[in-house]
Amino acid sequence: MTEGYNAIASVYDKFNAEIDYKKWADFIEAVFDRHLEKRPELVLDLACGTGRMTRELSRRGYDMIGVDGSEQMLSVACDGNYDEDLNKIYEILYLLQDMRSFELYGTVGAVVCCLDSVNYLTEDGDLEKTFRTVHNYLDPDGLFLFDVNSPYKFREIYGYNSYILEDEIDGCSVYCGWQNSFDEKTGICDFYLTLFSENEDGTYSRCEEEQREKMYTLEELKGALETCGFEFIGAYSGYGFEAVDEKTERYYIAARAKK
Ligand SMILES: C[S@@+](CC[C@H](N)C(=O)[O-])C[C@H]1O[C@@H](n2cnc3c(N)ncnc32)[C@H](O)[C@@H]1O
């Protein structure tokens, strides 16, 4: 299924620990309040990865489905199904499926798709296939909320830059070398990741991973949404519904399924 998250799945949450899914979920609920007559009962977290948003929304009382194309990411999500603090088991249905062609048992009130998962749609027609499938499984007037890395981020932050991330998991060091290669003509950004994980005996294991994202402009996203039966509601630069500008790094987009 989805490549690029094999070795990285086990360290993914550690390297993304700074993302505040509580605040993000507050924003999602604020969009629900503004644009839905009643709170949705069933919500799909598309490309749910390790399930951090899926669990956050489940804690808030939504029935959750998580779809992802990576067995390794879903395996981490399932490992997190028991919440020690709450002493409860999450009742989340996880499905290993492709976001361009997933199938559900029925429709849902809202679909969320977080942390630039839409940028992983890199082939011609992928965006439309995904948006059509999402539309197909949304209730009439149901909401689709997703975010993308902006063109500013691809050009000015990813570009050809390299980074080294460093952390510790269970007392063992983990280093991730991350090198970018962005092509302005195609809008494709390739990420070359090299992971060094310390073993218990002090030796290191090395893994290579490649990921690819595609840049989308707001106009392209709006056009694809409208072609696929959505009404574009808005694009924001933050959880407070702030307007986007030329230096916005992430667009948070809300759309409604017209049926
Ligand atoms: C950056 S991660 C985001 C994960 C999660 N939404 C989060 O907030 O952490 C992108 C996710 O998209 C998934 N993905 C990429 N392409 C996919 C596809 N075609 N179908 C389903 N999942 C896909 C990957 O497996 C990965 O879990």
Image (cartoon, rainbow, N blue to C red):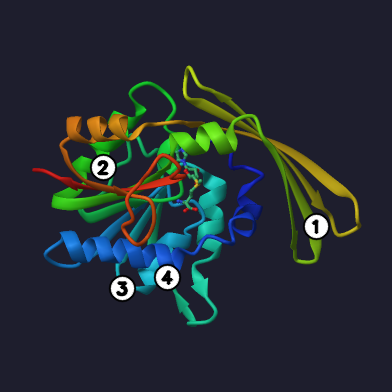
Pointer 4 or 1: first along the chain: 4
The kind of secondary structure element at disc 1 is strand
Between residues 237 and 73, which one lies in front from this camera angle? 237
Alpha-carbon neighbours of circle 4 within 10 Å: few (<14), some, or many (≥20)? some
- Left or right of residue 5: residue 118: left
Q: Looking at the picture, how far across and down is residue 197, in whole percent?
A: 78, 50
Does the closest atom of ligand 1 sit within 8 Å of the Cβ of label 2?
no
- Left or right of residue 81: residue 91: left
Pointer 3 or 1: first along the chain: 3
Q: Tag on residue 173?
A: 1
Asked whether the beta carbons under mark 2 and mark 4 sit within 8 Å of each other, the answer is no
Residue shown at the point (38%, 73%) measured from the top left: 59
Residue shown at the point (44%, 31%) measured from the top left: 215
Q: CA distance from mark 1 to mark 2?
A: 40 Å
Report the amino acid beneath label 1. Answer: Ser
Q: CA distance from mark 3 to mark 1?
A: 37 Å
Residue shown at the point (64%, 46%) measured from the top left: 8
- Left or right of residue 2: residue 132: left
Q: CA distance from mark 4 to mark 1?
A: 30 Å
Q: Looking at the picture, how far across and down is residue 131, in whole percent?
A: 27, 37
Please say whether residue 129 is visible from this viewpoint.
Answer: no
* Location of residue 82 with respect to 196 vertically, above or below: below
Alpha-carbon neighbours of circle 3 within 10 Å: few (<14), some, or many (≥20)? few
The residue tagged 3 is 61
Between residues 123 and 7, which one lies in front from this camera angle? 123
Closest to the camera, between mark 3 and mark 1, is 1
Q: Tag on residue 90?
A: 4
Tell which residue pokes out farthest to the front in this image. Answer: 246
Report the amino acid beneath label 3. Answer: Gly
Residue shown at the point (29%, 68%) measured from the top left: 62
